[in-house]
Image: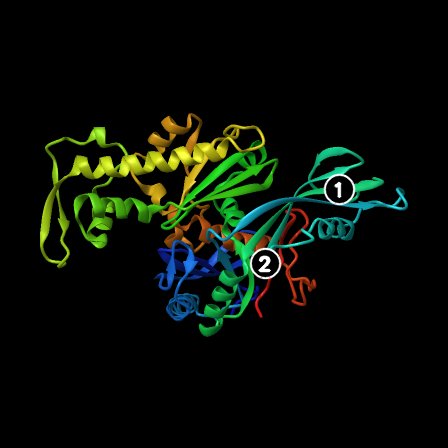
Amino acid sequence: MFNRPVDTIIDLGTDKICTIIGRQTKDGEGEVLGVGIVPTQGVTQDTVVNIGALAEAMAASMRQASKTARTAPSPAFVGITGPHLENVSCTGSLFKDDTDLALSPLDLENALVAARPPHLALGQELLHLVAREYILDGVRGIHNPVGMHALKLEVNAMAVLGGSAQVENLMKAAGRAGISVRGLVFQGLAVGDGVLTPEERDMGALVVDIGAGTTYIAHYWRGVFWESHIIPLGGHNLTNDIAVVLGAPPKGAEEAKRTWGTAQPWKISPTETIQITGFDGTSHQEVSRKNLCTIIHDRVVELLELVQEKAKELPLGRLPVAGVVLTGGTASLPGLREVAQDVLGGHVRIGAPVSLRGGEALAGPAFASSVGTLLWSLRYGTPQQEPHNGRSGVAASQSAALHPLRSGR
């Protein structure tokens, strides 16, 4: 029997579903009680394509996590990703009648509510409002103005919009799995909690989360999430290129990539050969390891060049001061950091998630968004009933100014 309440998160990716049941310890740190990791079904490139198959996989992951935690799960935050997501900059303001009265958390809430996009395109809905900075009587760069005085309070915010159809499909799959959804969390928000230091968040860093189906670029600056971009390429594209060029089945190509792959083919002897499993699952074909790694290198460079293009769209027009943090399953590819350093021209490191008590199974970069979503839930997931299109919502801590606005039905 646990004295402290538990939090449950479901990190849904193209390759795997990771469910974590955890709680906050007395010293304020995160603790993992149970983990359930199963292969994803019903999702292609972070897009739901089969509700029934996804429901089965989500239920299996939840059962596994509950069994290891030896406790019932709580309503879950579900990490949401996909090419249907969009960022929109927006602003809101509030005038104070009496400047003798200090700004309150409610004032910040009201200013942020005023920043909500007034009109959404058909098929879109608001998932988050993120306060990037507050402006007091024209003075910019204020993160938490509670207790300060001003006549005019403005907020520079980022709205995260999602495709209504994809959201509905995900919610329906969760419902069929018997999962109560507390809210949806854009994983670009959460991954920074898993891999960035406070200094990196403050000085500016780019988190490049290379998943199986897509790559998410999350820009953190001045201590907060600033914006994000999505590139529709991921680890599966590396595997597919290997399969097509070498005439191998996807399973054999994936095994070869994981076992023999590197992003630095010049380090491989041209005479070295490897065996790739054939289409019948028993036969093998002999191929050049250098050729395999050349295929990987070329696709990696293409992806990094796209990241470089997105970096030019940042407020400063270049890579942030703290550089790039590569994470996600593909970040474990040998040689990736060195190639990224050459292509991007700035500081690059591999971002493994922070270590949590009981979280030994979540140690690699592949679990950065999973750990980040749990930490996000523990830090910002305090429920407040807030109407949103006739539904209840969740408002997060003002210190982080993260607002997930949709909850389960």
In front of the other: 360 or 39: 39
Question: Which residue does the image show at 55% across and 52% down from the upper left?
Answer: 376
Looking at the image, is mark 1 or mark 2 earlier in the sequence?
Answer: 2
- Left or right, 384 with respect to 288, comes to right
Disc ID at residue 28: none
Of 50 and 218, nearer the camera is 50
Find residue 294 and report its image quarter: top left
Q: Measured along the vertical axis of the image, is residue 285 above or below residue 386? A: above
Residue 356, can we see it?
no
Amino acid type indicated by mark 2:
Leu
Which quadrant: the C terminus?
Answer: bottom right
Taking 119 as reference, is 91 above or below it? above
Left or right placement of residue 153 versus residue 295 in this view: right
Q: Which residue lies most toward the front here?
A: 122
Q: Position of residue 179 (x, y in %)?
A: 49, 70
Mark yes or no: residue 132 visible.
Answer: yes
Q: Residue at x 51, y 44 (%)?
A: 192
Does residue 290 appear left or right of residue 130 in this picture? left
Q: Which label belongs to residue 122?
A: 2
Which is in the foreground here, disc 1 or disc 2?
2
Tell me residue 83's x, y (percent).
46, 51
What's the amino acid at mark 1?
Glu
Q: Residue at x 13, y 59 (%)?
A: 280
Q: CA distance from mark 1 to mark 2?
A: 28 Å
Q: Residue at x 44, y 37 (%)?
A: 325
Which x, y percent locates residue 65? Answer: 41, 65
Would you name the residue on which mark 1 appears?
A: 154
